[in-house]
Every structure is written in structure tokens, then in C-alpha cells.
Amino acid sequence: MRGKVESLGLVSPSFLGTLALSVAIAMGGGALALTAGCSSSQSTFGDGGVGSGPDGTMGGDGSGGIILNQKYTGTLGGHMEGGPTDAGYGSDAFFAMDPPLMYCGVDGGAPPTPGGTPTCPSDKNRQGCPCPTPGMTAACWPGLRVDRDLGQCKDGTTTCVSDDEGLGQVWGPCVGYVLPTPGATGAAACQCFSSGQWNIANLSPCFYTEQGMSAVYGAASVLSGGSITCPSTVFPPTAPTTWSTDTLKVDCAGTFNLCFTIKAGNPASPQASDCVVGQACVSADYPTANTVQTFPPLPGWADSTPAQAACAAQFQATGGYGQMTVQGKSEYCEGIGADDGGAPMVFNTVPYCGADAGPSCQSGGSGTFGQ
């Protein structure tokens, strides 16, 4: 079987990310390998984005109980410096109007109740509230508990001073604290999640045809040693075990479900009705913020129905695009990526190549998301 390689490319200026790909066409019958990729293709996602179609499902519910931010867990200490003695108030007295930061990680538990009184809780060290030793300093927080130490929010410092009447000592002014910016999102709103990046090494589909037949079937390619291959030797094709490796970096720990979906249609104007050529999703916990973590590999896929074959033929004839979607929950229970209808949110739409693509064609791509 003889073959040839053609470079294809398509760039749409209406999207933040561009995706280039090359096509290997086997003459007669055989496989057509589309090598999708982009040079630093980036886009954004955050609350308020738009998702459409069956672009994956939420992976896991992020359950595991509710506790305070780790800085508050355990015995009364850390931020809870000095203050009045515990007068036996229940947690509702402290948390009804100023609840603690919720935690949706795997190590759930009940938040500890501060000491002191609801007016002078030991975890805030409010100005004018009793303190133990003149001259001692401690962290103080005049804001809401749910915002403390997230994003731009940070504690101030207060000093224990003698009160004006000489009857004891109290905490002085809280100096240097930073509160949320009104109307902001992400870090400026003192939220844990604000940005991250998903990087995929291989986004290339293969298209298989049989000599003398009009049917076209799509399937995942395989990236090995820097080369894209179409591994299936039968028609219709079989799915490889793995499509691609991938990594994730986010500024907040949590659970994420990420999908890459290839559709036939116009990348400049995606429609909910655009048919799906192929899709691969991966879901996992992301335990450590601000580190590049290897996610489970995207699984291989292959078309197997007449409807999928028709979509693959449409993609070959008129072109198409890939979409990255996300849905998840941060360790502090913030919903990430779901639109108002609960569907995963599209954060990167990237066109596959046209016939005039040049050497910019690559095998992988990435999407950067943020508030």
C-alpha cells in the first residue's frame, strides 16, 4: 500500500487557542491520521462559561465530609491566640452568621468550635476583646471565616495592650489585613480556585476507509517516540488502549473531570447539534495545588456505529474542531466548570487544520483556564 503525507492547517482568529494538524493518507484503502496540535494554544475558563452537548460527566462527587480549612483544624491554637475563656457556647452561636470555611476533601470532619464568646471568638482576636499578656502579638481577622487565607485575603497583626480604664488588657487594632475585592472573582474574591492548565501530548485522530466502500470510521491515534501512528489493522477500527498522556496544574486542590471531544462542524461557530467524532475523558483527584501532576492517560476510542461513521465522513469532507471541557469541585467545595444547567463547561475550542497548514502542525495542545 502506497501512501503520502499532506500537511493541513486551519486557524480561527475568533478563538484564543489554535490547533494545527497533519494528515497521512493511505492510498486505496487504509488509514488517515490527523495530527492535531497547537503551539502554546491557550484559552480561559471560569465561572460563567458556556458548555454544550454531552461533553463528559462529572467524575466523582467530591464528597468526604465538611471541616474547616486546615489552618483551623485540630485543637484551639494557631490563629486562636489567647482571648477569653470558653463559656460553653455551642458551634451555632459562633457560626450561624459567620460560618467556617467548608472542606470537601477526603479527610472530612466537624469543624472545631472557637473558644471565647460569639462577640469575642478566640479565632479572630478582635480589637477590644480580652487578651492574655500585654505586648504579645497575634494574627487577627476582621473578615468572614470563609474568606480567610484564600486568594489575596490575608491576616493582619494585633498587639495586646492595656485598656484605657486600666482594668485589664485587650487586643489593639488589626493592622495589615487584606479583604476580598467587591465584585471580583478568583483570587481577588478570596476564592481558592482561580486558574490552571491542562496539557495533552496527542490530540490526533485517525480516519479509516475500506477500498471500494464509502464508509469512514474515526479512531484514536498513538503517539510513540514522537511519531503519530494509526495502530488498527482491521475495519472498522479497534480502539487503542491509550490515546494520550496529559498533565494538570491548578492553583487549588480538588477533583476534576476533563474531556477532549472532536466534532464535525465550523470551529468559528460551534453548535450544540454538531456531531461527535470521538471523545476521551479523564477524572481524578488533584491533591497538591500549584504543582504539575500527571493525570491518568486519556483512553483510546474508536467509532463503531453508522451515525459515528457519518460524522467521521462529514469531518473529512468539511472539517471540524476539538473542545476541552471541565467540571469539578475544589477542596473547599467551590463548583468548577459547570454552567447553569450543570453541563461541563467548554474552556477551549480549537480548529483542526486545513489543506494549507505548514510546519506549525503539532501533535498536542493545551488549554489554560482561570476566573
Image (cartoon, helix red, strand yellow):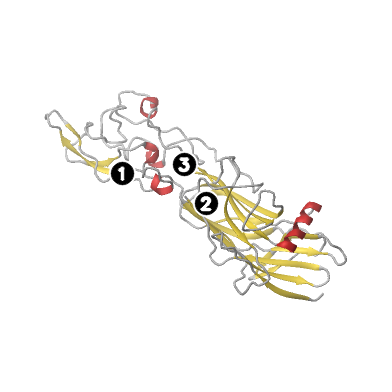
Q: Marks 1 and 2, how far apart in space?
A: 29 Å
Residue 342: image quadrant is top right
Q: Mark 3 or mark 1: which comes first in sequence?
A: 1
Q: Which residue is label 2 attached to?
A: 45
> Badge 1 local density, few (<14 within 10 Å), some, or many (20+)?
many
Q: Marks 3 and 1, how far apart in space?
A: 19 Å
Q: Position of residue 158 (x, y in %)?
A: 23, 41
Q: Marks 3 and 2, how far apart in space?
A: 19 Å
Q: Which residue is label 3 attached to?
A: 332
- Circle 2: residue type: Phe
The quadrant the N terminus occupies is bottom right
Q: Position of residue 65 (x, y in %)?
A: 50, 35
Element class at badge 1: loop
Above/below status of 164 relative to 202: above
Q: Mark 1 or mark 2: which comes first in sequence?
A: 2
Between 136 and 143, the one lying in front of the other is 143
Between 74 and 187, the one lying in front of the other is 187
- Circle 3: residue type: Tyr
Element class at badge 2: loop
Residue 321: image quadrant is bottom right
* Viewer can see residue 232: no
Q: Position of residue 334 (x, y in %)?
A: 49, 42
Element class at badge 3: loop
> Badge 3 local density, few (<14 within 10 Å), some, or many (20+)?
many
Q: Residue at x 40, y 38 (%)?
A: 146
Q: Are marks 1 and 2 in contact (CB under 8 Å)?
A: no
Q: Residue at x 80, y 76 (%)?
A: 2
Q: Mark 3 or mark 2: which comes first in sequence?
A: 2
Above/below status of 332 relative to 260: above
* Viewer can see residue 159: yes
- Circle 1: residue type: Asp
Q: Which residue is label 1 attached to?
A: 155
